[in-house]
Image (cartoon, rainbow, N blue to C red):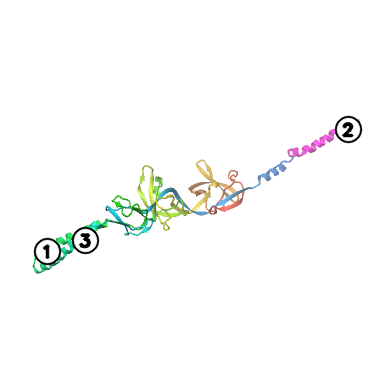
Amino acid sequence: MGRVTKRIITITIVLLIFGALAYPKVKPLFSSPSESGGQSSSQQNRVMQVEAVELDYETIEDRIFSSGTVQANELVELTAEASGIITGIYFDEGREVSRGDLLVKINDSELQAQKQRAEYRLNLSEQREERQRRLLERGGISQDDYDATLNEVNVFRAEVRLIDAQIEKTEVRAPFSGLIGLKYVSVGSYITSTTRIASLQEVNPVKIDFSIPERYIPRVQIGDLINFNVQGVDSTFTGEVYAIEPRVDPETRTLQIRALSENRGQVLYPGAFANIVLILDQIDDALMLPTIAIVPELNAQKVFVVRDGKVEESRIRTGIRTSEKVQVIDGVSHGDIILTTGLLQVRPGMEVEITDLKKTSEI
């Protein structure tokens, strides 16, 4: 009897130990539905934390990016009309000259001698014409004799003007004010009408030549503004479109455009490559959203709007894009709160807590 009692006591102790160890694991199986439901409900009622932006009005520009070339406003390769030996060069390379300045002189000694002879003949004929005019008034000569002398005077005057024109061709003068380049001749050089002397450029203002795809033709007009920059200069320059080519290039399907820009500091050099932004339109009340706030769908786009602490889904139409933002044309309004995080986890009707809120104009 004592041995059986001892075994029963041992089994009872083992069962009590086993039950004590298993109780925490089997307790949920015997707990009431209200108790287990309460714990699950507390987990489900935990509010999701998100970040959002508030839609605000911004000023944006509808732009086209292109590339082009800086051109001189006026450019000419200086050459002489007459052939001969250069007797004088009256400009410094790389310096400014004014319109009408004498730049190069060609030997005109032979023409000067011809002019002096013609002037002598002219003076003699003018004196003869003066005497015969007095005689004509007194009836001393006939009208025909006087007319012959007067015609001779006019011929000599025309001869002097012709020689003056020939002498003028031996002078190379600046056709406009500008910056003269390097010279390619020297005093004593024999030049012809094809000899390159130097280049003359008007570099303030400068022209900006560029092209745009033909699909933008209806949107470009005289007076549109451009921003551009060139290599080696940190500044951004502005210009205004003043001429548009009236035909599309059939090979490139682009339209040539020319703008004008001031160059007071002469930091823009003709021939330089320019990166250009053509401003087609400026919108002062645009609603811009960060691209990360937009959820793409098949043939559509949507955003999540927070109203009264709950999430709502809204389809949108977009417009102009920048590097970080997209213009929203329809679907949301000024002042709406748009989620930027948690877009994959939230669902319509879900409550959220906004931990960080910024206006779109401040981003």
| Disc 3 secondary structure class | helix
Main secondary structure of the magenta stretch? helix
- Numbered disc in front, either 1 or 3: 3
* Nearer-N-terminus badge (1/3): 3
* Nearer-N-terminus badge (3/2): 2
Which contiguous range is marked in magenta? 1-30
Q: Examine the image and state in which quarter residue 148 appears.
A: bottom left
**Residue occupied by mark 2:** 6
Compute the Cα span from label 1 to label 2: 174 Å
**Residue occupied by mark 1:** 146
Q: Is residue 263 magenta?
A: no
**Residue occupied by mark 3:** 116
Crowding near pointer 2: few (<14 within 10 Å), some, many (20+)?
few
Q: Is residue 122 above or below residue 77?
A: below
**As rendered, which of 69 and 120 lies closer to the eye?**
120
Q: Are marks 3 and 2 in contact (CB under 8 Å)?
A: no
